[in-house]
Image: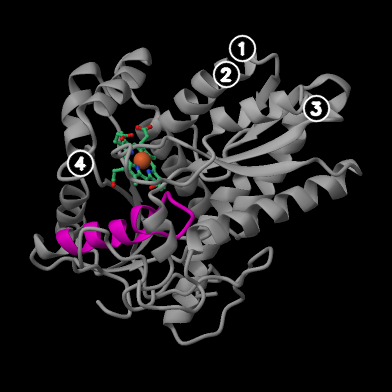
Amino acid sequence: MNPAGHPDVKPYDALLVLSFGGPEKPEDVVPFLENVTRGRGIPRERLEQVGEHYFLFGGKSPINDQNRALIAALEKDFADHGIDLPVYFGNRNWDPYLADTLAQMTADGVQRAAVFATSAYSSWSSCRQYRENLWDAVEQTTGAPRLDKLRQYYNHPGFLEPVVDACLEALGELPTNGDAAHLVFVTHSIPTAMAETSGAPPEAKAQPRGAYVKQHRSAVDEVADRVRAATGRAHRHDLVYCSRSGAPSTPWLEPDVNDHLEELASDGVSQVVLVPIGFVSDHMEVIYDLDTEATATAERLGIRAVRAATSGTDPRFVAMVRDLVLERAAAERGESPDRPALGSLPAGPDICGAGCCPNPRGPRPALCGADS
Ligand SMILES: CC1=C(CCC(=O)O)c2cc3nc(cc4[nH]c(cc5[nH]c(cc1n2)c(C)c5CCC(=O)O)c(CCC(=O)O)c4C)C(CCC(=O)O)=C3C
Ligand SMILES: [Fe+2]
């Protein structure tokens, strides 16, 4: 508490919500895809397909609106808790671009901001690439504020508890309350090489190499345990992947959700809940890869599929962001805050380890790490 009796956010004077970005209208789709894939060797064919996913939804991704809704919920939550902290919004791949937002924060006199990225797990794509983006933006901005990226939150109760409830709700929509339903936990596929080096530098033989999959398994087991405790039934469950990209010759994490559904159908499974455990809102991967493509696959196979909700603006998820800011602020003041974490892995570090989650295309400077 600060002298006014409000939670103490010192040394922070702003929060930055950092996300992926997405197109807002059809003309944005191609330039957006160019931003995402510059220098990545994504085959032209794949890009055309992904463009079609966006055009199917009018050329607009829901992700920016969802982030604006999260920010509105955060502003209300902060106000309700007597926290005076402006919230800024910056993206990696689309307007509002991170560099523009940082220039605005600088002009507004922000000195030191906490950064919340809309990506819960560790890997180059989901963590270090955002840290590289922060470095680049700070480099371009004279007098930029100091930025502290908040820890990964895949095992935070405020992230996992809404997922448990979403599973229960989805089960309730199935005949006989999803008695025999499989829980199909889905996350974004990444190249297996990126998955292996996630969490630690390539030369490290020790834990936590392979953090991306380990973190997902820990989250999945925790949710499945809690669903079992609530229903009194042990639902069979698996971790599978969506949105594979890249060259066909590069191995990515498998099985793909559609192949997995084929497998389940041949085992006689007739009900599934698709749980987007890798995502925090219903962006394009969720509404296309799961709600459109995987749902059509399930239908074709005679499997009844219900998709569980993402955290979105669930009040517990919003409160988690507040808790992460307060936790980090306390740590930066030299206190020893509680670090809530569920499952088999401890709360992640505030400062990423040296060389963790390396960039597959070679080292690039990144903010918010022991090697920054
Ligand atoms: C781990 C991970 C997350 C989850 C963590 C996080 O949220 O950050 C994520 C999220 C997202 N990915 C998104 C969109 C895209 N990702 C692509 C390509 C890629 N993603 C990768 C990984 C991830 N991606 C990778 C290794 C590539 C290959 C190219 C590269 O090495 O970078 C491509 C290119 C086309 C294609 O090939 O699919 C697009 C359009 C959107 C926006 C959705 C919307 O618009 O609503 C979101 C939230
Ligand atoms: Fe992606």
Q: Quick check: 318 above or below 149?
A: above
Q: Position of residue 44 (x, y in %)?
A: 20, 28
Q: To which residue does mark 3 refer?
A: 172
Q: To which residue does mark 1 refer?
A: 300
Please state the quadrant of the image where ligand 1 appears. top left
**Are discs 1 and 2 less than 8 Å apart at CB?**
yes
Q: To which residue does mark 4 refer?
A: 41
Q: Residues within 10 Å of mark 1 (few under 14, many from 20)?
A: few
Residue positioned 25% across, 20% down in the render:
25
Residue positioned 24% across, 76% down in the render:
372
Asked whether, in this view, residue 331 is left or right of residue 369, the answer is right
Of the residues shown, which amino acid type is indicated by label 1? Answer: Arg
Callout 4 secondary element: loop
Callout 1 secondary element: helix
Q: Position of residue 46 (x, y in %)?
A: 28, 28
Q: Quick check: 194 above or below 74?
A: below
Q: Is residue 292 visible?
A: yes
